[in-house]
Image: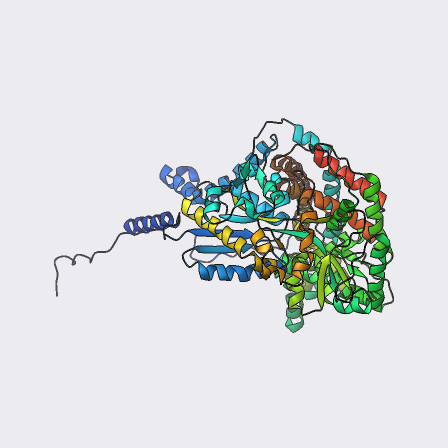
Amino acid sequence: MLEDSPPPPPYRPNRRAVLGGLLGAAGALALSGCGSLGGKPRVREWNLFGGGDGARLLEIHKQYVAEHPNVQFEAHTLAWGPPFYTKLAMSAAGGRAPEVATLHLSRLKGFSPTTLLDPIPVDLLNEAGINESDFLPASWNRAMVDGKLYAVPLDTHPFVLYYNTDICKKAGLLGPDGKIKPVKGVDAFVDMLKAAKDVTGKYGASIETTNPWRMWWTLYGQLEGKFFNEDGTQLILDDAKALEALDLMAKLAADGLVPRSANYPALVAQFSSGDVGLSFNGEWEVTTYQTAKMPFSMAPFPVVYDVPKYAGDAHTFVLPHQANRSKDDTKATIEYIAWMLKHSAEWAAGGHIPAYQPVVTSQEYLDLKPQAEYRSVAPDVFFDPDAWFSGSGAQLQNEAGAAFSGVFSGQSTPKAALAQFKAATQTLLDTPSPV
Amino acid sequence: MTVQTPPRVTPGTPATAAKPETGKPWKERWAGLFFVAPFLLLFAVFLAWPTVYGLWNSFFNTSLAGVKQEFLGLQNWREMFNDPAVWSSLKNTLVFTAMSTPPLVIIALVMALLANRRGVLGWLLRFSYFAPFVLPATVVTLIWVWIYQPGFGLVNGLLTAGGFAEIDWLNTDNRAMLAVVITTVWWTVGFNFLLYLAALQGIPAQVYEAADIDGANGRQKLFRITLPLLSRTTGLIVVLQLVASLKIFDQIYLMTNGGPNYATRPIIQYIYQNGFTNYRIGYASAISYMFFAIIVIVAVLQFKLFAGRKEADA
C-alpha cells in the first residue's frame, strides 16, 4: 500500500490551548469560591472554650446546626489566652476574620474595638428579639465603647468554691441540708482547709499556683483594694492589703493546705482524684467533674475578708473586623447570637451564669444544680483592672503569675513578689498604648 | 587529606568541559532566569520583603491592632537597650545554647560510633537513636512534662525509689532549664547522629585496613583516623546546632511557658509576647533585628573559623 501523503492527524489539542483552558477554569473556580454564591449565609465562629464548657458548647452547636439547615455554620475552638487573642487580632487586622468570635469583656477596650471589631448592629439585634432591657445595666454598659455597642454579653464567670461532698461530710464541713456551711473570716477559712486536709491526708484545696491571679485578685478585692486611679494613669496599689493577701497565700502553701506547685491540669486532676476536698477555680469545670461522676457541689468562694468580691470576667460575642462584611452573613450572625442567648440555660449547665436575664429568672436555670448555687454572686464579680495590658490571659495576669507563683513554691517572699509585680505593672503603664 | 579515589570516567562519554556561558544567545540565558522566576518571586515576597519591612517597622510604633502609626526614629532601639527583660531573656537563650550544644554534638558522635555496625544490633540502634526526632514538638513536650511531674512522674519516681528528695523540675528556678535541655537532647540528637553516621560510612575501609596492617590499635584508629576525618562534619554540625539552639522557643513555650518567673523565657518568646500578645510589632521588630544580628555574627564567625582550618589542612 502506498500513500502519497500521511493522513492528516486526528485533531489533537495543542499544549497551549490545554494549559490556557485549565488556567481559565481554575480562575473561574477561584472566583466562585469568593462570597457565598451558594445562597446560604455563612457563620464562622471562633471560641476559646477548651474546658468542660467547650464540651457543652459542642452540644449546643449541634442543636443549632440541626435547627438551621439554611445556615452554613462552622465553629472552631482555639487554645485559650494569648494564642486565641493573637489569632483573632491578626485575622481582624487583615480584614479576613470569622463572622463572630467570643471575647472576654475585660479585654474589650484593650482589643482596639475601633479597628479590630465591627460595631454590633443594634437594630438587627432588636429584630432578633434581644433588647437592652434583657441585661443587667452594668454588663450592657461595659460592652459599649464610645457610645457604640461592640459586644453582646453571654455570661459571667466568677471564681468559686468546688467541694467534694464525701470528703467534706467526713470533715464535718456540711450543714444539715448537705450543703457546705458558709465560712467567714481568715481563721474559719484556714480551719476549713485544715479539716479537709485531715480527711484527704494530702492537701485541703487545689489551686493553680502557676497562675494565681484569680486567687489574689479575689482576696485583694475582698480587702477593698484599689488598683489604678480614676483615669487609669497611675498605679495606686495598697501595699498593706496586697501583702495581706499574699501572706495568706504563702501561709496556705507553707502549712501544706494547698500544693506548692500545680498548673491548671493538675488543679483539675487533684480535685477529681480526691487528693483534695476543695478546689478554688472558675466555675467552668462542672461538666468535667460531672462526667467523672464524682460527688461534688459548688458554692460562692468564702468571704475571707471584709466584703464579698469574686474575681471574674464575662464572655461576650463580638464581630471581628471584616473588610467586606456581607449583609446576609451579618444578619445570620446576629440571629445566631440571639439564638445562643435564648438557649443560654444549656450554656449555664456548663457552669457560667447567663447574662440574658429572661434565662436567669427561668425555672429551667433555677433547677440546675449545682450551677444555680452561686448565681447570687453575679453582681459582686470583680473585673480585672481597666488597661490595654489587662484582662483574661493578658500581660498583667502573666506578670502576676510570674511573680506570685514563687509565693506558693517558696522561691519568693510575698514582699519580693509584690515588688516585682509592681515594677512590671509600672513598666506596662509607662509603655505607650498600642491600641 | 589524600584518601580520595580518582574520578571514574565512563568510556564513551568524552570528558566534556562546560562551554563558556558567554557564547549563548540571549534567549537561552533568559530561559534560565525564567525557570528560577517562581522561586525568586516567592523568595522576594515571603523573605526579602518581610525582612526589609521588619526593619522599617522597627522605627515606627507599628501596632498589630492597626491603629495610628508614627515615626519614632531610634526610640524602640533605645527602649530595647534599657529593657532588662530583653537582656535576661537573651541570657536564657545563650545559656540554653551553651548547655545544649556540647551534649548534642558529643552524644551524637558517641551514638554514631556505636551504631556504625552491620547486623540487627546496628539496625536497632540506628532506629532507636533516630526515632525521637520524627516526633512533633507537642508530643515530645507532653511526654516529658509527664516524666518530670512531681508525685507520679518517672524521674521523681526513680529519685524517691533511690532515697532522694523529689524535685519539681519544671517549676524550680535552676532546674527548669536543665529539664528542657535534657528533653531537647533526647528529641533532636538523632539528626546530628544521622549526619555523623553518614560521614562515618563515607570513610573508606582501606584506610582502616592499612592501619591494621601497620599494627594500630582501636584507640589509635579512633583518634588518628576517624575523628580527624570527621572534623569537617563536626564543623557543620556545630554551626547547625548553634543556630538551632539559638532559635529555641517551642519546647520552652510548651513545657514551662518561660517560667518559673521567666527563668527559662527565651528571647524569641519575649519577641512573641511583645509583638503578638501586646500588639507591639514595632518594638518586637527592633528586638528581632538585634537577635538576627547576633545569629549572623555567630554563623559568620563559625564559618571563618572552619574555613581557616580547611586552608591549614590543605
Say if B265 sits above or below B53 in the image.
below
Kindly indicate the quadrant of the structure image that contains residue B93: top right
Which residue is at the far bottom? B120
Left or right, residue A50 beside residue A309: left
Left or right, residue A54 beside residue B115: left
Front-most of A355 and B229?
A355
Residue at 82 percent across and 51 percent down: it is: A249
Q: Is residue B258 visible?
A: no
Q: Quadrant of the C terminus of chain A?
A: top right
Residue B183 in the image: state x and y as whole percent.
71, 58
Count up the numbered dots.
0
Left or right, residue B1 beside residue A44: right
Q: Is residue A330 visible?
A: yes
Front-most of A267 and B111?
A267
Front-most of A103 and A368?
A368
Say if A249 sits above or below B158 in the image.
above
Residue at 61 percent across and 61 percent down: it is: A349
Residue A138 in the image: state x and y as whole percent.
63, 43
